[in-house]
Image (tube, rainbow, N blue to C red):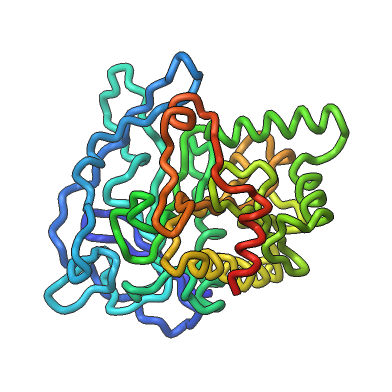
Amino acid sequence: MKRTVTHLADGRELIYFDRHDDADRSAVDTRTLPPPPRASELRRDRLLGEWVTIAAHRQDRTYLPPSDQCPLCPSTPGRPTEIPAADYEVAVFENRFPSYSGRVPEQLDGVVPGLGRCEVVCFSPDHDASFATLDLAQVGTVMEAWADRTAELSTLPGVGQVFCFENRGAEIGVTLAHPHGQIYAYPFVTPRTERMLQVARAHRDETGGDLFADVLAAERAAEVRVVAANDLWTAFVPEAARWPFEVHVFPHRKVPDLSALSAEERAAFAPLYVDVLRRLDRLFGVPMPYVSAWHQAPVAVDRDLAYLHLQLFSSRRAANKLKYLAGSEAAMGAFVNDVYPEDAARRLREAE
């Protein structure tokens, strides 16, 4: 895998990932850009004990541009983009409108800065592609990029957790249609991860077992909610799914993060994941909006408790209906699902 590091006109880092060593990545960003924004502000919610990030500069981020003005497509003569090259395989660059940044103001005046880093991962140069249409070699390149960035971002000062994810579809809130994902290097451990690790610790103390491994073993034994599986990975609908269509993808070997996966595990993930994505798209005959979220171990704590896995979920509950987070979910955090998880798993298995 060839890895080429360069910089955009405003100093942000850009990294190309290529399967071929002869890829030419000498193109230069010719734009005139303002300096990147300073780090956001962290504020503590005293009622919940959670961090909230205030990033007002993100109000000005690019919003639903027409396809001929997409900033994630390769550059063409007369139209430079975030990717200076005329073509690319996978490109990763610092977000122009980051939620977290290492650029800290000199005068903080009691403000807690949102230290960290936010990156954009472009999965393909093809504006009309999707992750589900990538060939398996391309998925492998994306996996290499995720693993590389997880390892590197974990070494940054103050980073507590690295989160690789993809939001797909306007229904989810995506503002750029080009196939891409993001990586957040948080300056804290996220609430969901803290809660999962708390439950995992209690399970270990009570039973001596590993919560995640026990859940995976139970789902594989029951089979009724398994959507797809191979020798190294299993995809299943969780027993208490919060979303109408939600699939968790676990490696059979416990590892803390993407960088710890073996070459065989990375290769085995690609066909299974693409199969699940294509089943989601076939379910209603329209592209399925989704969030695809990698749950990784925190950088410095509880790495022995954590178990790498992917959570994939959609807000679509029927061909012409979406699930909105209304009163119970949004205010109380108490989910009500309109679809039996067993039915969701069956329908996905039948979506050949």
Taking the image as drawn, is residue 42 in sight?
yes
Locate residue 158, reporting x and y percent: 48, 35
Q: Residue furthest right?
A: 208
At 65% from the left edge and 35% from the top edge, which residue is drawn? 196
Based on the displayed image, in which of its 4 quarters is residue 249 positioned?
A: bottom right
Q: Position of residue 162 (x, y in %)?
A: 52, 45
In the displayed orientation, state which residue is furthest to the bottom.
Answer: 22
The total number of labels drawn is 0
- Which residue corresponds to the image point at 87% horizontal and 32% vertical from the top-left? 207
Judge left or right: residue 7 versus residue 323: left
| The C terminus lies in quadrant | bottom right
In the image, residue 293 sits, relative to residue 79, either above or below, namely above
**Near-viewer residue (165 or 188):** 165
**Residue 253, image x and y in percent?**
77, 56
Q: Which quadrant holds residue 9?
A: bottom left
Height in image: 259 above or below 188?
below
Report the residue at 48% width, 75% height from top.
Answer: 134
Residue 165 seen by the camera: no
Nearer the observer, 333 or 125: 333
**Residue at the top extreme, as displayed:** 47
Front residue of 340 and 41: 340
Which percent across, then down, holds residue 237?
Answer: 65, 53
| Residue depicted at 39% across the width and 56% down the height | 320
